[in-house]
Amino acid sequence: MNAPTSSRSGGRAARRAARSTALPDNLRPVRPGMEGGRYRPLSEADVLKIHHAALDALETIGLADAPESGIAHLTGAGAILGDDGRIRFPRALVEDTIAKANRSVTMMSRDGLHDLELSGNRVHYGTAGAAVHLVDIDGKNYRDCGVQDLHDAAKIVNTLNNVHFCQRPMVCRDIPDNMEMDYNSLFACVTGTTKHIGTSFTEPGFVAPAIEMLHMIAGGEDKWRERPFVSNSNCFVVPPMKFATESCEVMEECIKHGMPVLLLSAGMAGATAPSTIAGAIVQAVAECLAGLVYVNAVKPGHPAIFGTWPFGLDLRTGAMTGGSGEQALLTAGCAQMHSFYALPGGAAAGIADSKLPDMQAGWEQMCSNVMAGLSGCNMVYEAAGMHASLLGFCHESLILGDDIIGQALRCVRGIEVNDDTLALDQIADVCLNGPGHYLGTAATLSRMQSDHCYPTYGNRMSPKEWVEMEKPDLLDTATARKEAILGAPSAAALDPMMDRAIRDKFNIHLKG
Amino acid sequence: MNAPTSSRSGGRAARRAARSTALPDNLRPVRPGMEGGRYRPLSEADVLKIHHAALDALETIGLADAPESGIAHLTGAGAILGDDGRIRFPRALVEDTIAKANRSVTMMSRDGLHDLELSGNRVHYGTAGAAVHLVDIDGKNYRDCGVQDLHDAAKIVNTLNNVHFCQRPMVCRDIPDNMEMDYNSLFACVTGTTKHIGTSFTEPGFVAPAIEMLHMIAGGEDKWRERPFVSNSNCFVVPPMKFATESCEVMEECIKHGMPVLLLSAGMAGATAPSTIAGAIVQAVAECLAGLVYVNAVKPGHPAIFGTWPFGLDLRTGAMTGGSGEQALLTAGCAQMHSFYALPGGAAAGIADSKLPDMQAGWEQMCSNVMAGLSGCNMVYEAAGMHASLLGFCHESLILGDDIIGQALRCVRGIEVNDDTLALDQIADVCLNGPGHYLGTAATLSRMQSDHCYPTYGNRMSPKEWVEMEKPDLLDTATARKEAILGAPSAAALDPMMDRAIRDKFNIHLKG
């Protein structure tokens, strides 16, 4: 046993040396924008069936409740307003729109270092949602969430390698005035992270103040329009097949101000969308195609994300559920439709129904996150921190989500096959000439960091080490990390002069 | 708001009525043997590259350490014994073997109700492994596991819809004599579950006593050979590329006695197999192809499972890890190779590195389990209960695994696309004539149970209900279920006369 032992120690020393060298970004094992798409839940024939059913729905059923301005834009583009008030879309109009729509959108970051290039099957993960509770894991309590919680979430996102953007995940329930809530939500996110931000507006009139703030932060309207680092998450439909009148007006405002739009159709399969997965996808696709026609009628080529977000429902109770296999399939099926249209798309995944970051939350968050990634979803929304079927947001869970998404991204990266990785020479050498194992081979050492995504919080100790380390608890580890992040100054803080100027102009609720 | 409310109540009452009707088995939302394969981690070209590299490895490197009897069988079939003692396999021999091997194996159950038909991309999940600890979640302790723990695991498996077979997951460390340990392991499993059982033998001489016991239980040798409800999990290789001499002799014994064989190649990527995913798959495929030639040389067409089980390694420490994205890819890539050969295959998934059933365990177990299913793996081994990178087995985790695998199977079932599920008529009716929602439609009600896989332990309550129910804890729920299962008599208990007869003949350690 001497030879293997000593050569194993040699390997260990060499591994120690190798891992002390930091990797350049392009060699990191996982990165934003890796290509998914090897999982295709639908056959090509099924994709076409869904496409044609969506076109049929648009042509024969259409959408109700467009605002006056929308009716003008849409009929101007060739849609038909019926006597029943519904707007119907001839197939040619939809097909022409798909052909000319913007199919490669960059979601800008404020720092220019975290831009997300949406095209093909490039995968990105981030937060989103409108949780109304913060999950306090210490006391297992759900309490109303507020602007500080939102800012803290953004600050945490800023530190996580695998959470690529920060769409507002929580509602600031401590700000009763809706206009103030909207621009304060934006301010809380912008000052927490320099990554791309997604936000919402309650009314069309609330867009202008936010834009004013963004112009100030960007250093002028031209700078903002050059690099719009905030997008508008826009629930432009009330499924089934009705425009959300006021949200459409918000959308028009955002387009006017150069803000990219997420066309978000959030049907609930079994309530506001058909209960079948295929049917819910058909309706979501139809609704988003209507939105795409709308956007391109207002401004051809305006950056828009095809946001088919159908949610699952627990039909026994009629309550929403996001942690199921059905949800993972809804999202993966939608991603395949985005890919079919070659349009930048997004959908929801990573939702836990569990109230706490427990084993259930782990399996629920991984299931839909990994399937969304494998199916090549460009923007995976609500990917971390979401509990209680979207009602609660948890900071510790957000932190642990970085590990979940890291492993999901490793799966997205997939299996590289070439002469090096097939390793036939290495197998021959190890078996016929070598020590009989691969621990210390040059190939093993050189790939130690580039091929393997190591967990940050996940514990791989042996039971013996684990006992020796006093059985570290996953949630305690996450809490300690949270406290360290929130205890440090925000890396995204605005220049103090700018911060002062904004606070002078707006009623900012976040403590300075 | 009156109309929607009242019609929603109508829907609720109808749903209540619908769910009180039990579904026939063929309408259950998930079942053993559903077809996977929509996730294909490898391109067709990559599959061929791996295949050819494996053939090259067999032809040029070959395997060392075959027993005398194996050398005779293999050279008799056309393999070549080199001066270096290695047996090399001409391509034609391997290709002929693949062509004539048994490609549709039935894993029998003792009760005839749980037979598993392995063919195509039909997916089944079950336990396996050789854990040396039982995880006691109450005290967070790892203690030595014994025969009662193994029996309890089998008893739990017997009650779980989504755990389809029971390969021995734990070693009986309380039985010092290896022969007694082998037949006691078998007895502990057989008396715990009527599902298919997998077991191991330490030495060739230990097969005969176990077979004698199985003949008794089956009611004679002919009955046993007709429906062999136990398979042999056989580590016939010591990677890289060496036969495990004694295990090969065990395998020959099992073949003689009509016991199906799992050809298990358990390399560790980076230690006993190349560190690259592709290279580890090449070596595992080569080794299992050698095993396939061996089995078919001994007895053409003998039922064998292509058990490519490469494991991941944490290269920073040299310790095994099973909870990573790399592990999920190793397993999914292997499943695609099984599918390429159209051979019944199995691989490992569902392994947690986490020591306890916490959030980490949830995400780790789901990641590889769902990917194994989507890739169409016939037999997903170690799918539930495994912790600490296979060192610990946890009964509560096994129970919760039923939920994890249920959701994974729902994903495997996939998205049905046909005129009914596309739901265009329903969308039209709801939007143009109906109540504007789908809650009470006939289509929604009729699919409430058949389309949706509801969790048994996973909690979908709203935060409000959850508080009212005093915040039920997932692990407490699992523990209560465990106590109920273990407190009841075993449904797989042998007839008392038979039990007595076996105890008279064998030194049975399990308390009667």
Image: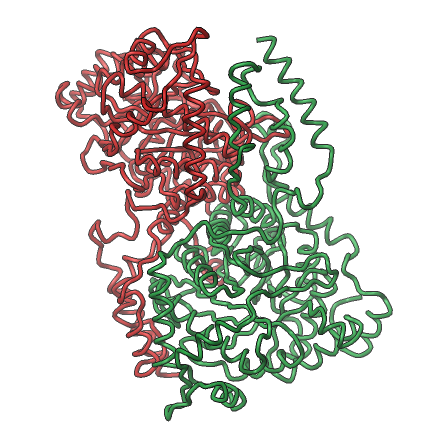
Chain colours: A green, B red
**Residue A159 or residue B123, whichever sits in front:** B123
- Position of the N terminus of chain A by quadrant: top right
- Furthest residue toward right: A497
Q: Is residue B61 above or below residue B389?
A: above
Q: Quadrant of residue B219?
A: top left
Residue A29 horizontal/vertical position (percent): 62, 42
Residue at 43% x, 23% y is B145
Residue at 39% x, 43% y is B375
**Residue A387 or residue A139, whichever sits in front:** A387
Residue B333 horizontal/vertical position (percent): 44, 38
The answer to whether residue B140 is visible is no
- Tell me if A84 is positioned left or right of A497 in this view: left
Residue A59 horizontal/vertical position (percent): 37, 80
Residue A469 horizontal/vertical position (percent): 65, 30
- Furthest residue toward bottom: A83
Count of number-bearing discs? 0
- Tell me if B293 is positioned left or right of A426 in this view: left
Q: Quadrant of residue A413?
A: top right
Q: Quadrant of residue B337?
A: top left
- Tell me if B105 is positioned left or right of B290 in this view: left
- Tell me if B487 is positioned left or right of A284 in this view: left
- Position of the C terminus of chain A by quadrant: bottom right
The answer to whether residue A21 is visible is yes
